[in-house]
Image (cartoon, helix red, strand yellow):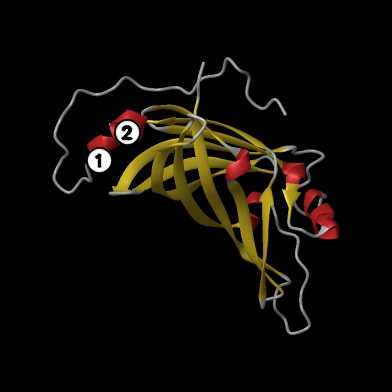
Amino acid sequence: MNLFSRSSTLRRPAAPADAAAPTGVVAPDPALAALTGEWMIDPAHSRIGFSVRHAMVTTVRGSFAKYESRLFFDGRDPSRSRAEIALATASVDTGVEQRDAHLVGRDFLDAGRHPRITFTSTAVQLASKEVYRMTGDLTIRGTTRPVVLDLTYIGHVTDPFGYERVGFDGTTTINRSDWGLTYNARLAEGGAMVSERLRLQFDIAAIRATG
């Protein structure tokens, strides 16, 4: 995939003058200032996926195997942080080939006409000491709607190969019909085969970008 050109950059507003945090506003941890910079999600150690109730009694889980990202994290001023993620729609994997084929078809994701699912952040705020609330535009099947994602900061390490890594764990719940994913079958008992509510999950290990 070539979802982002190598020359693309995230837009960053000018840094504001240093000031004390207003009363009631969570102040960022000064130790995170060293993490300010551009990062990329490491697909080998991350998972961008979903879960949905199936037949009212079980849960189906899946993920996207192929995606690209551009991230900018500002440890001093979280509001300047940005994220862009593009998923290859056809890379969805639930562990069942027949089900995956149905998901990428016209009943659901329609990968032939909509090869990408994208998320672009529009605002970030520090909700608590370790939780960042990211608002952004999620596009599925050509429909774009806002979502709010709470990301918990897990930690930061330098691995044995010298790469700086940072971890975040996030989730949000959407109504799939808001994005045109309206296909469904009814059970004999009257319930839906697939729930309208879809939980999106972001288990992210990001590596500091170089060059």
What is the quadrant of residue 72 in the picture?
top left
Residue 175 in percent (x, y) is at 59, 59
Q: Is residue 71 above or below residue 58?
A: above
Q: Secondary structure at mark 2?
A: loop
2 or 1: tag closer to the N-terminus: 1
Residue 51 in percent (x, y) is at 62, 61
Image quarter in which the N terminus is found: top right
Q: Please, what is the three-letter code of the amino acid marked with disc 2?
A: Gly
In depth, the one of 14 and 64 nearer the eye is: 64
What is the quadrant of residue 98 in the picture?
bottom right
In the drawing, does residue 47 fall left or right of residue 22? right
Q: Residue at the spot x=15%, y=30% of the render?
A: 19
Residue 84 image label: none
Number of numbered discs visible in the structure rendering? 2
Q: Residue at the spot x=23%, y=46% of the render?
A: 26
In depth, the one of 20 and 44 nearer the eye is: 44
Residue 74 in percent (x, y) is at 35, 31
In depth, the one of 143 and 26 nearer the eye is: 26
Q: Secondary structure at mark 1?
A: loop
Reading the image, the residue beneath label 2 is 75
Q: Residues within 10 Å of mark 2 (few under 14, many from 20)?
A: some
Q: Please, what is the three-letter code of the amino acid marked with disc 1?
A: Asp
Reading the image, the residue beneath label 1 is 29
In the drawing, does residue 58 fall left or right of residue 131? right
Q: CA distance from mark 2 to mark 1?
A: 8 Å
Q: Is residue 29 above or below residue 182?
A: above
Cβ atoms at labels 2 and 1 below 8 Å apart? yes
What is the quadrant of residue 11 in the picture?
top left
